[in-house]
Image (cartoon, rainbow, N blue to C red):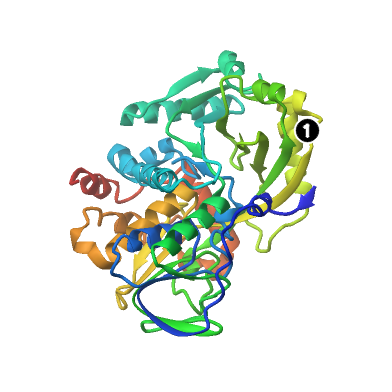
Amino acid sequence: MIFQDWWYTTLLDLPYPFQPPLCGHIQADALVVGAGAAGLAAALRLSENGSRKVVLIDRNICGGSSTGRSAGFLTPDSELELSQLVRRYGPKGAKDTWECAVRGIERMVAVVKDNALDCDLQVQDSLFVGNDAGGWKDAQEELEARRLLGYAQTVIPAADIPTVLGSDRYTGAVRYPGTYGINGLRYSQGVKNVLLQRGIRIFEATEALALRDHTVVTHKGSIQAEQIIFCIDKPVDQLCPYEPEVYHAQTFLAISEPLDDEEAARLFPDGPLLCWDSDLVYTYWRLTGDKRLLLGGGSMLTTFENNPHTKPDVIEDVIARFKAKFPFLSELSFIQYWQGRIDCTRDLMPTVVREPERPWVHWVLGCVGLPWATFCGDFAARHAFETDAQDDHRFYQYFAESRGFLVPTWLEPLMGKKLVFSLNNGWAKYFQVDKGKKAAQHRASEF
């Protein structure tokens, strides 16, 4: 396998030109820093007001970081499943937060359809599969949570798994609609073109180095703006005061040669699905539009490594485990692999902050999943200029940097950031009950 992000290969036939870096000083009404899913959503929202001067910058190309390395799962279920949100926030709070990602999906799909973007949007139901007896219990808990909150779903017992998935190695599953697969990098470049047509100024290969009052300094210029929205990953402490609230999780992706029609039909007898299993470091897979198998996963040893792990050993192990469950694909060749080093927070929920001392500065950080990022970027943009007209201020409480964690921030220098985040992630996923659950339920019931 070649160590290379397959999505970059798919850009070769697109006519979207690179936008040169910023040189010189310019002024704007709004500046968005970061052109991943969150930053693009913010810029799209701001561009709806045709009288605003909006600038978008990115240190890479639009979508070139986490968004363009992702598996392109458009599902509300990223790191936290619905049943885990119910445990943490209660039914009303869980529905409130789950709908954030649902709205993110709806927003992305609308942008694709309204602008006829060429980004391999695939309608694919989600399938959460249990790996063992504990996994079947997890699937049943997810089923009950969806029933409780009134979401559509289908439970699939072990004996019926082969009707939707070409394996008899799973203990049960929950299937639900309203989800999609997408090429996140092509989506991002398509949105770039939409923004350019709307008169938004875009500068790629332009890194924000410093923030001075209303001005962001880059390596060859600066932008002064009334409102500044940072939608960045891998933040550094000299730029971002909330850098301690963000860490990274590392998973791996591989892309196969195209499956033939018979192989695709055996893998997905009832049509392609977005799939992931019940393991703590879960395996996930789906088909692209040209019938390539996209397979991802990781290991406990490398998920929270401080430095990027680039050797193929982790993804080779994921592929071997997958082929053991689908032996008819034993000869399938995977041609490229890459690591997806995504930002996350201690409790796997996004952080969205409007600075109290500098209310013109907004931060969107640690969004796991394209739908969550899209909602949060759109949310920050709506509140930047029109916060009094918005009816969802409550999400500032859900996404506050000061929410409670199992291991507090002050222990980090003693324990190390890697261990603190690992413990808090596990606690949030399997045990945490929010101390403000009643308050969260009350906030949700007000709207």
Q: Residue at x 68, y 52 (%)?
A: 9
Q: Residue at x 42, y 62 (%)?
A: 197
Instruction: Tell whether 237 sits left or right of 364.
Output: right
- Tell me which amino acid carries mark 1: Leu
The foreground one among 296 and 226 is: 226
Residue 149 visible in the displayed image: yes
Instruction: Tell whether 173 sits left or right of 362.
Output: right
Residue 302 visible in the displayed image: no
Q: Position of residue 375 (x, y in %)?
A: 38, 52
Q: Residue at x 31, y 28 (%)?
A: 150
Task: Report the number of discs.
Answer: 1
Q: Position of residue 39 (x, y in %)?
A: 44, 62
Q: Position of residue 258 (x, y in %)?
A: 72, 35
Residue position for label 1: 332
The residue carrying pointer 1 sits among few (fewer than 14), some (14 to 19) or many (20 or more) residues within 10 Å by Cα, namely: some
Instruction: Tell whether 30 sits left or right of 176.
Output: left
- Residue with the most extreme top position: 159
Q: Position of residue 201 (x, y in %)?
A: 44, 71
Dot 1: element: loop
The foreground one among 87 and 318 is: 318
Would you place residue 255 above or below residue 382 in this image?
A: above
